[in-house]
Amino acid sequence: MKRTTKKKKVVKQKKQNKEKNWFTLEAMIKLGIIFFTIQLIGLLVAHNLYTQGYSQALFTENINDAINGIYLFGMIIVTTIIFLLIVKFKRTKKLLWGVEMLAIFTTSSIVFTSFFPNNYLISLLLTTIVFALRYTQIKNYTTRSLAAGIAIMGAGAYIGISIGMIPIVIFITILSLYDIVAVFFTKHMVQIGKESTQNNYAFTIAIPTKEHHFELGNGDLVIPLALASSILTSGPFTNNWVISGLIILMSYLGIVISLQFVSKYKTPMPALPPQVLLMLITLLLGMLLGI
């Protein structure tokens, strides 16, 4: 009789959890603070890098060459395959820490150098502080998210100033379609997400709330920043800064839609597809309205 009662309580609790709305006002506000802070500082980094002459094409001599978008997607695929192989062979997992360290050091250097272009000592000192905070508190998700946020600023800004609007539109369109396949069909992106959160790798941003602990992939923040940075520094619009701002706003709404889906159906949902769709609509309207 006791077992039956206990079982009923467990079933009732599961039903309540399923009906509970995870994406509360608290979650929306925290997401907004984190998202817009990273995006706005990232745009400032992009502006600084561009005015300091760091802009150069990633693969070809012309940043507007469409093939750059294909090459960039190819790099994502290669990186994903390497990640999955490392995860499969558990003895090599230390390599991921090495990759993370290199990424954080490089991107942090980009961010701080953009603000202190004539004082590399200060840039190095700030980078070292970020490095120390991250790796002296390896299990702390706050310092992990801080390091990830700075990495997003550096990566998104640098990619954005190094690739034109057409190739980056091609890139994010292909990437959003790939994201659907990777989450709903092959599910390897879900595996990567779980591996990252379980080991506290700085490949995701933590958004903890009373109702649920959300984890947002770095790519969901890098992509809008890269597109907005590209438009801001080399866009074809009359008011590039307005379009950049709208892109960031629409991207935020895309993430909100995605997290609402996750909250309602309690299942993984790729954030990039709604983000990219809204960002592309923004670009199209910007062209049609002559903004």
Image (cartoon, rainbow, N blue to C red):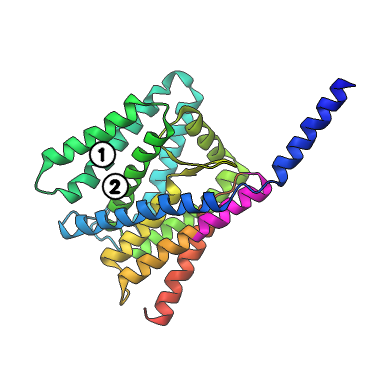
Residue 197 position in % (x across, y down):
49, 33
Instruction: Pinpoint residue 191: horizontal percent, then vertical percent.
Output: 55, 35
Q: Kindly indicate the quadrant of the structure image that contains residue 171.
A: bottom left
Q: Nearer the viewer, residue 56 or 110?
A: 110
Corner quadrant of residue 201: top left
What is the CA distance from the residue labelled 2 to the residue labelled 1? 8 Å
Instruction: Say whether disc 2 or disc 1 marks the residue closer to the N-terminus.
Output: 1
In front of the other: 34 or 100: 34
Three-letter code for the amino acid on which mark 1 is drawn: Thr
Q: Please tell me the numbered disc located at residue 156.
A: none
Find residue 72 and report its horizontal and vertical position in percent: 37, 50
Which residue position holds label 1? Answer: 106
Q: Amino acid at mark 2?
A: Gly
Determine whether the residue tagged by mark 1 lies in a helix, strand or loop.
helix
Residue beneath disc 2: 154
Whether residue 134 is situated above or below residue 20 in the rendered picture: above
In the image, 140: left or right of 45? right
Does 165 lie within the magenta span? no
Q: Secondary structure at mark 2?
A: helix
Q: Can residue 55 be spotted in the picture?
A: no
Q: Residue 32 placed where, x, y %?
A: 45, 54
Q: Name the residue at 42% across, 81% down.
A: 289
User: Can you name the residue that lies furthest to the top here?
Assistant: 91
- The reply to whether discs 2 and 1 touch (Cβ–Cβ < 8 Å) is yes
Residue at the outermost right position: 1
Answer yes or no: is residue 233 visible: yes
- Magenta span: predominant SS is helix
Residue 254 falls within the magenta-colored stretch: yes
Q: Which residues are magenta?
A: 253-267
Q: Residue at x 90, y 21 (%)?
A: 1
Quadrant position of the C terminus in the picture: bottom left
